Image (spheres, grey):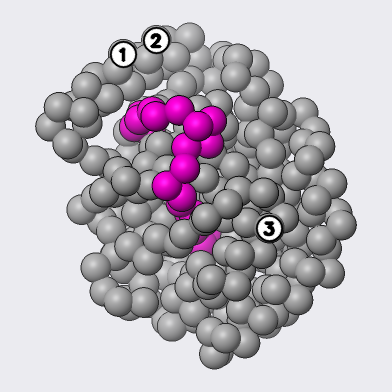
Amino acid sequence: MDRNKITNLILDRLGSEREQIEKQWKHPEGTTTRHFVVENLLPAEIAEAAYEAFPRDGNGFFNRDTFREKKRTSAHLSEYPTILGEITYAIQSPEVIGWCSDVTGVDHLEPDPSLYAGGLSMMFQNDFLNPHIDNSHDAKRDRYRRLNALYYVSPDWTLEKGGNFEMWNDDRSKPVTIISGDNRLVVMETNKTSWHSVSPVTSELPRCCISSYFFSKESPDETDYFHVTSFDGRPEEPLKRALSAADNALRNVAARTLKLGRGKNEANTTKK
């Protein structure tokens, strides 16, 4: 499907929900992280086509498998059916980004065609993503990460299947859960305290997501800061919490001194 048509469909749907989106953004429930959720972002047949375009076994995806996370990702959209790229870059279009900037008040947002840490994500049974805050910057470290746009396309997804999106307050004591439902868009701010995670997947079918990140030159809190993607354990995982704290400190030092970056090697190198 033509990217411009998808862009217009997204804009029409966002516009129809603007009042509710503004309320959600200004008054987040159960979390300090501002966010909004939009159901049925695109016509059902487009969401279904997107899901069918994901390889059922995650073939060709980069496998992340550590104590921090277990999932598969790919930023190489040219290797998969075109519908995935068309949706991704429609979400990253100037028109959609401009709309998000206007409704959230986050100025001067820019896309990231390299899909650094973004792109396609698949999670299978027992996969998970521990509580974390995202890398503060883009790959070149000259723009701050400001918004995450997560579009879920797994049919008939329910709470019981796991793999659901979670947002935490700063003490990481109890999450707010958003089901990773089919054709659902979640947009959240990212900053020093926007802790989020994905609960362990219990379904035998994959949980599929198209992720885009928006950046700006301006810091979220008007201070100059940098941090790598920093993880924590869940409340019932004290040992993992201690290990994560040490691991975060070590990776921050390595990133600052050696300019190492998580995910740089998997970034998209083809033109959109």
Q: Is residue 75 visible?
A: no
Identify the magenta region. 208-229
Q: Position of residue 258 (x, y in %)?
A: 12, 32
Return the mark for residue 242: 2
Q: Of marks 1 and 3, which one's residue comes earlier in the chain?
A: 3
Q: Quadrant of residue 136?
A: top left
Q: Quadrant of residue 7?
A: bottom right
> Does the stretch in magenta take in 227?
yes
From the image, tell me which residue sits under label 1. Answer: 246
From the image, tell me which residue sits under label 3. Answer: 102
Q: Position of residue 240 (x, y in %)?
A: 42, 16
Q: Position of residue 153 (x, y in %)?
A: 61, 65
Q: Could you tell me which residue is drawn at 42 percent across and 81 percent down?
A: 81
Mark 2: amino acid: Ala
**Left or right of 170, for residue 264:** left
Q: CA distance from mark 3 to mark 2?
A: 40 Å
Q: Mark 2–mark 1 contact, CB under 8 Å? A: yes
Q: Position of residue 42 (x, y in %)?
A: 69, 75
Mark 3: amino acid: Asp
Task: Using a 10 Å C-alpha cutoff, classify the residue at mark 3 as few (fewer than 14 neighbours), some (14 to 19) or many (20 or more).
Answer: few
Mark 1: amino acid: Ala
